[in-house]
Amino acid sequence: MKDYKLNAAVVLRRNYEDLPFHADTDAEIARRVNDRSVTALERCEETYTYLLPATLDAESRRELEEKRLLSADVQSAVGDTAYLREDELICLETAGTDHLRVAAYNDNGALTPCLTAALSLTEKLADTGRMAERSEYGFLTAYPSDAGTGMRASLLLHLPMLTMLKQLPAAMKMASTGGMTLRILPGGLCLLENRITLGRDEKGIVEQLEAIARSVCTLERSLRWRAKERKDLNVADKGWRAYGICQYALRINRQEALNLWSDLVLGLSVGDMPYDEDAADALWRIAHLPTEALTWDSSLHPDVERALRVRHLMNHGGN
């Protein structure tokens, strides 16, 4: 069942040594960066789709930003361009505050494959121009906070018990001690990300991030186990309430579907429920369906169609 570690992403920032930083403010620098990027991508065996972030619809942008494949500020650059690999697991942004932003995503919470894929693409990009790097600092970036590895690695974690019992400050302190940050998101979700990029190598950062994630998730598991041992009515109530809403709701928006998924998963961890892990996983998938998929053969509003599918899932066992 999808739980605890939900997904992973690695972002690497790089700049060409012979071009001024901040290509986002200079159209000529942006053009030169994009020309080099296209040359590098043409040498790759994989297929990349050309995107203009400024013209993407809100839902497409949200999906890519949630996967950390696209940065929130890229559309403000004068030559902002993105190249998305056909499997939608790697995205290259060009001509932003840094010349290159390479992002890799993994839906199973595995950081090492993300790092391997991102490093592989940056090596191909380096063939079209030497990267700005110094032996004492590492890779140079537009903002000093990114210098060194130029890497931001992150894990999306599901921590509903820590949220419910207001124990997230303890987890945040645990993360901070290891040079990481833990950002709270809706629906019992948290984003764990490295804060320090200087003085550590990429592999070391990934290992430290995974170690802290294990510690935080162990704390979450222990709290769930205690709730199960004492037959915590408040926790069970969350699962039952979510189950009832799923059976009868006529409209469910995306965020509510994610909240319901979180409560269903939490309910399963404390005792027998009238639904199973497969149903919880199916609800996760329904919550993430794009509007186009919901309305492809339906005239209903997306939130109404989503609720219909959720009701069918919980009442008839399908999705």
Image (cartoon, helix red, strand yellow):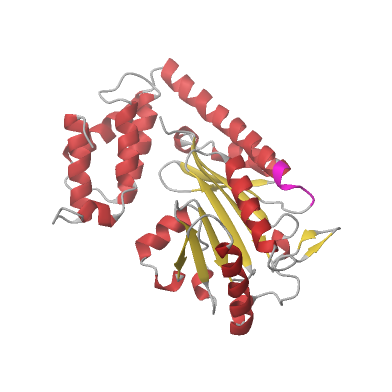
Q: Residue at x 53, y 62 (%)?
A: 71
User: Magenta segment, principal secondary structure?
Assistant: loop
- Total numbered labels placed on residues in the image: 0
Q: Residue at x 65, y 34 (%)?
A: 211
Is residue 18 within the magenta segment?
Answer: no
**Where residue 106 sits in the image (x, y, percent)?**
51, 44
Question: In the picture provided, is 159 more to the left or to the right than 28?
Answer: left
* Residue found at the far top of this picture: 229
Question: In the picture provided, is 90 more to the left or to the right than 124?
Answer: left
Q: Residue at x 60, y 68 (%)?
A: 39
Question: Which range is magenta?
Answer: 199-203
* Residue found at the far right of this picture: 136
**Placement of 280 over or under 35, stated as above or below:** above
Q: Hey, which quadrant is residue 247 in on the image?
A: top left
**Placement of 228 over or under 308, stated as above or below:** above
> Is residue 72 in sight in this rendering?
no
Q: Please identify the quadrant where the N terminus is shown.
A: top left
**Where residue 95 sits in the image (x, y, percent)?**
59, 72
> Is residue 190 in sight in this rendering?
yes
**Where residue 137 sits in the image (x, y, percent)?**
82, 59
Q: Hey, which quadrant is residue 300 in on the image?
A: bottom left
Front residue of this view, candidates 306 and 240: 306
Q: Please identify the quadrant where the C terminus is shown.
A: top left
Q: Hey, which quadrant is residue 212 in on the image?
A: top right
Front residue of this view, candidates 245 and 27: 27
Is residue 202 within the magenta segment?
Answer: yes
Front residue of this view, candidates 284 and 271: 284
Question: In the picture provided, is 208 more to the left or to the right than 186?
Answer: right
Question: In the picture provided, is 20 more to the left or to the right than 282?
Answer: right
**Where residue 69 sits in the image (x, y, percent)?**
51, 56
Q: Residue at x 55, y 31 (%)?
A: 217
